[in-house]
Image (tube, helix red, strand yellow):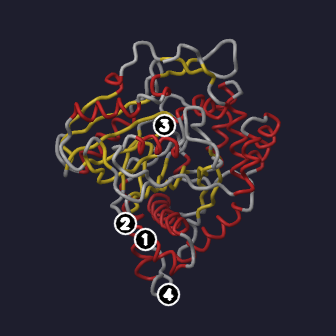
Amino acid sequence: MSSEREHLSPVDAAWYRMDEHGDPADIGSVMLLDGPMDEARVRATIADRLGPHKRFHQRVVDSRHHLLPSWEDEPGFSFDAHIDARTLEAPTDAALQELLSELMSAPLDFDRSPWRLTLIHGVEGGSALFSHVHHCMGDGFALLDMLIGMADRDDAPPEPVALEPEPDWIVQARRVAHDLPAGAMSLGHLLLLPFDSKTLLSGKLAGKRHLAWSQPVPLERVKQIAHACGGTVNDVLVAAFAGAMRRWLLEHGGEAPPIRAIVPVNMRPRDVPIDDTHRNWFGLIFLDLPTDKAERQARVAAVEQEMNRIKKSKEAIVALGILATLGRAPTVVNHVVEDLFTRKASIMMTNVPGPRRPLRLAGYTLRDLWGWAPQCGLGCGATIFSYAGHVRIGVRGDQSILPYPDALARWFVEELEAVDAHAVAGLHAPAAH
């Protein structure tokens, strides 16, 4: 390892400075293995596969002499210090959910490299590996690439997982990531965006997070629904979550106004590698969710129309410029703008396309893989994740806003099933009230 310090990129620094007590900008993921875990073998595999990545040996330190914090080698680094082991009290989803919520609520230690892995024994059908990584180490696409990189070498190379950015965004994305005036102009665009609807999602955060996930849904089935609805797979998935969110709003507040989601968009040009220097390269869009519409088909159409509008805009580039600007600004400015972000939206939502076929790790087949993106000051986050021919949604909620996210995960599947039963037949199905 090198003893020289290296400055964080402006975007990485922005995510580092967004972090605050009770609301860390972190990413969690879980991999289910198809058998009881040989802990020594898995530890050795992790050390072998992550060893070449210097960021996993480094911590973040602030500098009095430079606006950007730096990476430096973690003193006395060892992989074992970052890898823990736990055993479930019972081999149930409820026990796994309780443990993962506990692990996700525990803050990462910035005296060390900001990541940890937990080996979990006693999972039904085998075992599990939970990863908890700070966003300053990379965006969801980069960290998914890291997880896939831990797969056994005898696997064929997995398909690319990052969505291609719009072609005319690429040149501008390169510029705003390094151009301070362009970033300042981007911040002006954010100021003009109206505040989001005031709902129970707008309350003060408690800092403890609860995790939930849905049952898997065959991806081919979602494609058939999308074809019948005349939209894309993404349109159908987002509309299903909007339907679940509508049910939650009606149940908890009696009203369901339209709400806005912050959605990450991959901005990585084809020629930019996912390496230790290019870990965060994405913009954010503000997506209006049609939670006010009672008909499911109308929600799919509304999402399709909104996505088409966004594709013609430069909103993702704007957000990339804001993040690059924040990385160079004092921490207090970051918190002011983060507060502004949270008043412009109610939830964080992302759609991550994973590998299309099962992977193997340390000789075990990964039965499933899904995760949770950061909430970034918001009370609810939803991550739609596809893997090996099926799709799940992972939901995490702050205890004071969404203490029982299970309902949203369950309703997401029910909404897909309702569209499958009605829209495929050419009918419009009203949502449950």
Q: Amino acid at mark 2?
A: Val
Amino acid type of the residue that numbered disc 3 sits on in the rendered structure: Asp
Residue at image point 71% right, 27% down: 329
Looking at the picture, which amino acid does disc 4 mark?
A: Gly
Q: Between disc 1 and disc 2, whose residue precedes?
A: 2
Mark pair 3, 4: CA separation: 42 Å
Question: Residue 416 shows which numbered tag?
Answer: 1
Q: Earlier in the sequence, mark 1 or mark 3?
A: 3
In contact (CB < 8 Å): disc 1 and disc 2? yes
Asked whether the beta carbons under mark 1 and mark 3 sit within 8 Å of each other, the answer is: no
Among the 4 quarters of the image, the one containing residue 96: top left
Q: Quadrant of residue 261?
A: bottom right
Residue situated in front as seen by the camera: 62 or 201: 62
Pointer 2 and pointer 3: residues touching (CB < 8 Å)? Answer: no
- Tell me the SS state at disc 1: helix
- Residue bearing mark 3: 26
Relative horizontal placement of residue 360, taking residue 311 as reference (left or right): left
> What whole-number distance in Å separates the C-alpha atoms at marks 2 and 3?
26 Å
